[in-house]
Amino acid sequence: MAKKTTMKKAKEEVLEDILFACRDSLRGRAALTDKRDMLLTLVFLKFISERYHDRRAEIEAEYADRPERLAVFINREQEYGRVGVFKLAPEYDWEQLKVVEPNRIAVALDDAASKLMEAQPRLRNALPSALFVNSGTEGNVIKQVMDEIDKISHKKFKEKDLIGRVYEYFLQAFAINANKEDGEFYTPHSIVELIATLIEPFDGTLYDPCCGSGGMFVQCSRFVEQQGGNALAVSTYGQESDPTTYRLAKMNLAVRGIEYHLGDRHASTFTDDMHKGMTFNYIMANPPFNLKKWYDSKLDNDVRWKGYGRPPESNANYAWILHMLSKLEPNNGRAGFLLANGALDDEDTIKIRENLIKGDKIEAIIVLPREMFYATDISVTLWILNENKRGGIQGSRKLRNRKGEILFVDLRSWSENIYEKKFVQLSSEQIARIHKIYTDWQSLPEAAEKYESPELYRSVRIDEIEANNWSLVPSRYIEFVDRADIDTISVFSSFRQDVKKLNQQLTDVASEISILNSTLNSILNSVSDAPFTEIGESIEVVTHQNVLNEDLPVMGLNKDKVFMPTAANLDGVKTTKYLIVGKDMFAFSGMQTGRDKCIRIAYNDSDTRFLISPAYTTFKVIGDAFLPEYLYLWFQRKESDRLGWFLSDSSVRSNLDWSRFISIKVPKPSIEVQRAIVDIYRCARKARSISEEAAQQLKSICPALMQHIIHP
C-alpha cells in the first residue's frame, strides 16, 4: 500500500502583514519623516510601474494583429496619459530598479526620482531629492523593503482600491503633522461620502483650498466612480501650505491617475492664492480647526472680506468660509466643508454670520457625531453653501425656491457604528437617509411650510435665526421631545412606603441624639482636659499570613481611609504571603504620605475577613487605653494627615515609616468619653445615611412628578 502523503498548505500572505514588515524593516534605521518618505516613494514607483505595464499590455492586445500600428502606439505618450498612466523609461521602471545591486540601490532610486520628475512636469517637486542616499540606510535594508513592497500587486490582492489602502496605511502610520494646529491628514471615508452625496460633484471643477495629502480628492473620485460617473470629467484643483504635505499630495494623486492642479508650489491660501481669479463648481474641504497663526497685515482690506467683515485674527474659521465663498461659481457653486462647532455662534463673528445668512449663502448646517476623527474626539459641523437657492432644474430634480431658509440637522445621536474599537462612522444607509432629508427639503413644495423631525432636523426661516442672535447651533431650533418612560403610579406608591420607613428611622436617630445631647458638653470638657499619649504604647503589629491559601477577597485601601477591592492584576499571583485582616484590625501604609498629605490607614469593623498586600502593616489596639473606633476617628482628621506629612521623610517616596507613625500622640480621654464620642459619630453617620437615602428618593420622585406634569 502506498504511503499517504499530505501537502502542507502555504500560509496565505495578508496585506497588513506585508505593510507592517515594510515599517519593521526600517525600525531604528532613519528619521520618522525619512522612513515615511522612503516607503511612500517606493510604493509610488511600484504602483506607477504596475499601471504602466498593465496599460502596455492593453495596447499590445489591442494592436496584436496590426504590428505596424503597435510599433507606433506602444511608445506614444498620449496612449498612456489619456488614462492617467505615466509612460516610463527603463531607468525609473520598478521592474528594472528591483534588480539593482544593494551597493548601488540608493543612488539608483534617487536618480530614478530625479529623472522621473524631469520627464513628467506634473511630478515636479513631488518626490524628495537625494532621499535614499542622505538617509544613510544600508542598501540591503532598502532591498529588503523593496522585496516586501514587490509582493503588493492588484493581481494578488483583489482590492477595489489597493493603492488607496496602502497609501492610507502609511499616511496614517506616519501622520506626524496631524494635530489641531496643522489640520487633519485624513478625513474619514464616510464624511467625504456624505459631503459628495450632498453637493454631487459629478462634472465640472472641484476645489480644496487646504488639500493636505489629497485624501478628499481621492475619496471623491472613488465616490463618483461608485455612482457610475466618470472621475475624469471632474477637474481637480487644490492648494497646500506645508511643503512635505504638498509633495505627498502630488504623489498620492499621481499614483492613482487623478488629474490635478495644485499650483506651482506650496503656499498659504490666504496670502498667496495659487488659483487667483478662478471660481469652481464644487468645493470640498476639511480646514484646520480653529487655526490661529494665519493672519498677515496685508489681508486687512482683502476683497474676500468685502460685504461680510474682516475675520478675527485669532481664528481662521470664518476666513476659510469667506475664501471658499469667493471661489464658488456665482450662479451654481456648491460647497461642503467641515468646521469646529464653535464657529456656529462665536461672539466675535456675529456680523459676518449675519451677512452670510441674510445673503442666503448658507443652505444647510449638519452637526456630526463625536469620535469620527483620529486626531480629535470633538463633534464637528458640516456646512453646505449654495450660490443658487432660487430653485430650478438640477440634474434630474426640480428644486423649489429655498431663499430665506436654512436646513438644520443634528446627527450627534448617530454614534452606533463603531470601528477600530472607538471611532464612529456613518453607514451607507444613514448617508442615504441624510441625502433624502436634504433632497426632500430642496424639492418637496410642502417643505416650504413645515419640514421637521424632533431631535433630528428642521427647516428654519431667517427671522427666527435673527431672534436667536444669528446663532447656527441646531439645538436652538430643532425640537427636543421628553421621552421619559416612567410608571408614575408605581413610583408614587413606592415613595410613600419609603418615606414612612425613613420617617421612622429619623425618629429613632432623633431619640438617640436626644440621649447623647445631654452628655455632649461634659464630653467636650473631658476631651479638652485629656492627656496626649503615643499610640505605640497601645497598639501591636499582627501578622497573619495566608499560609493555608484561603480563597479570600483581596483588598487595598484608598485616600478616604476605607478598604476597597484591589485594582492590581492578580493573575498568577500566589496569595500565601498576603496578610489576613480580621475584625477590629487596622491596615497602615506610610508610602507617599508626604507627597499625598495623607496617612493611609483603614479599620475593619465588620465580621468579614479579607487579604491585603504584605506591603501594608496590619495591627490592632491592645490594652484599655483606646477604643479602636476612637483611634480611627482621630486619623480621619485633615490635621492628622497634615501631621503625617510633617513627620514624613524627604525621600523620593516621602514615607512615614513605622517608628514615626507610632510616635504620634493622641488625646486619651476616659473609655466612657471615647465610647460617647464613637456613639455620636455612629449616630451622625446613620443620619447621613438616611439623608443620602432620602436624596436618592428625590432623584426618583422628581422625574415622576415632572412626567406627571408633562403627561397628566
Image (cartoon, grey):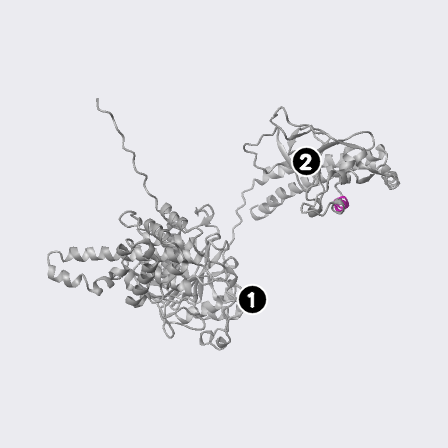
Inspect the magenta stretch and tell me whether residue 417 lies in it: no
Residue found 67% across the figure and 39% down from its top: 693
For the point 21% across and 21% down, which residue is it?
1
Q: Which residue in the structure is indicated by mark 2?
A: 616
Q: Position of residue 574 (x, y in %)?
A: 58, 30
Q: Give 209 or 60, whichever is nearer the viewer.
A: 60
Check the picture and name the quadrant holding the C terminus. top right
Query: In what element is the residue under mark 1?
Result: helix
Q: Nearer the viewer, residue 699 or 3?
A: 3
Residue 444 seen in render: no
Residue 452: x and y in percent read 45, 56
Apparent side of residue 517 relative to residue 114 in the rendered image (left or right): right
**Secondary structure, magenta segment, majority class:** helix
For marks 2 and 1, give the CA distance: 56 Å
The percent coordinates of residue 521 (x first, y second) are 87, 40
650 to 672, vertically: above or below: below
Assign a secondary structure to mark 2.
Answer: loop
Residue under pointer 1:
347
Which residue is farthest top?
1
The answer to whether residue 701 is visible is yes
Q: Magenta segment, which residues?
A: 638-643
Which mark, by number, is residue 610?
none
Pointers 2 and 1 in contact (CB under 8 A)? no
